[in-house]
Amino acid sequence: MSEPIRWGIAGPGFIATMFARDLENIPDDAAIVAVGSSRPGGADEFAAEFGVARVHGSYAALAADPEVEAVYVATPHSGHLAAALTAIEAGKHVLVEKPLTLDEREAVRLFDAARANGVFAMEAMWTRFLPHIGRIHELIDAGDLGEIVQVAAEQGIWFDPGHPEHRLYDRRLGGGALLDLGVYPVSLALSILGAPDRITAAANFTKTGVDAQTTAILEYDRGAQAITTSTLSAWTRTGAVIAGTRARIEIEPRWMMPSDFTLITGDGARTEFPNDYVGHGLREEAVEVARCIRAGLLESPRMPHAFSLLTMRTMDAVRAQIGLEYETTT
Ligand SMILES: NC(=O)c1ccc[n+]([C@@H]2O[C@H](COP(=O)([O-])OP(=O)(O)OC[C@H]3O[C@@H](n4cnc5c(N)ncnc54)[C@H](OP(=O)(O)O)[C@@H]3O)[C@@H](O)[C@H]2O)c1
């Protein structure tokens, strides 16, 4: 039996707390041994909730902790690259929250550094590792849908515009609908259809200068299209439909979380795939990290560097069309 991966958490906020709770389901694969905040005392609450003994007042101190084997970067988007580089240069493996970085150039820098330091690096696109998404890829690969012609996926949540200081509304922190929410539908479309031949995008903006709502059409010369939508302004259906020449798959209610889905053939025959997953699901990406580290891999075959670079490149192209710029460090 292998020892659990010894995790250090950088940025003990909302998602880090969800991640830590879900890791409690996989004690053989993951143990949180340390936590680091950018502020002295900032990690105390997290450390108390999860019984973490090693508490650091900077990401550099966390990265230097000899007990830490892998760092989970869970800061706002604008902080991903710096926190990841700090860990990588200290010889730690990294799992970096989505979107990996602010743009493709930053992503290249992150992966180049990881390779140069001989450490594992992966974007925390947790949805890709959920059982229902895995099953859907199996059905697609087996030809059950025929040739895929359309993917339509959405992610929309109403975030109170009365809190313009929130990271989602703050351009300096990489806020906006596309990077935070749109990365899910874009990632799904790319995982099924690959790199698009053309991209068309439209957006409307918040008063704080980030995209409130962005829709992108990804077009493929072979005749396929994907429509990806994301909004901070409405509670959308958050469903996804993957349609092919033989059948379609409908994923509802929230396709990016553990979910039911249905396979519907052209003649209307329905096969239901009920969701029986227990728990949040964030642990699945940690299981993959553990598997890869134990196998000595520097990237996951299921979420390779090239795929995250494609995701960032696609979002860069969307941002160029809608006029959304971030201050990057590259
Ligand atoms: N996988 C998912 O389902 C999911 C869901 C939500 C978010 N996320 C991703 O997780 C990341 C963090 O999101 P979150 O909602 O957890 O964020 P959050 O709770 O607002 O912040 C996370 C941590 O980042 C640091 N931080 C917060 N505001 C900051 C600021 N203004 N400047 C610098 N650092 C700041 C704080 O840690 P310190 O104490 O270290 O400063 C904070 O605890 C984002 O990349 C987001 O896209 C993923």
Image: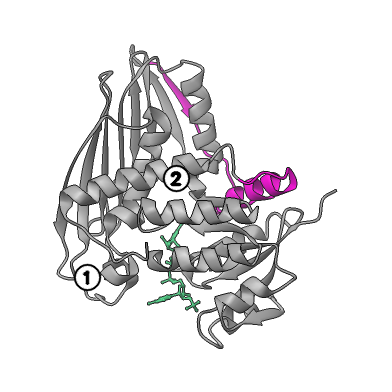
On residue 161, the disc is 1
Ligand 1 falls in quadrant: bottom left
Relative to residue 108, is residue 225 drawn left or right? left
Q: Earlier in the sequence, mark 2 or mark 1?
A: 1
Asked if residue 98 shows in the view, the reply is no
Quadrant for residue 228, please give it.
top left
Q: Amino acid at mark 1?
A: Pro
From the viewer's side, name the closer residue of 29 and 248: 29
Asked whether mark 2 and ligand 1 are closer than 8 Å, the reply comes as no
From the viewer's side, name the closer residue of 323 and 148: 323
Pointer 2: what residue? 308
Q: Amino acid at mark 2?
A: Ser
Asked whether mark 1 and ligand 1 are closer than 8 Å, the reply comes as no
Can you give x and y, in whole percent of width and height, for residue 170 in the image? 28, 71
Furthest-right residue in view? 1
* Label 2 secondary element: helix
On residue 319, the disc is none
Q: Which residues are magenta?
A: 269-298
Name above or below for residue 89 compared with residue 203: below
> Within 10 Å of the Cα at label 2, are there few (<14), some (14-19), or many (20+) other Cα atoms?
many
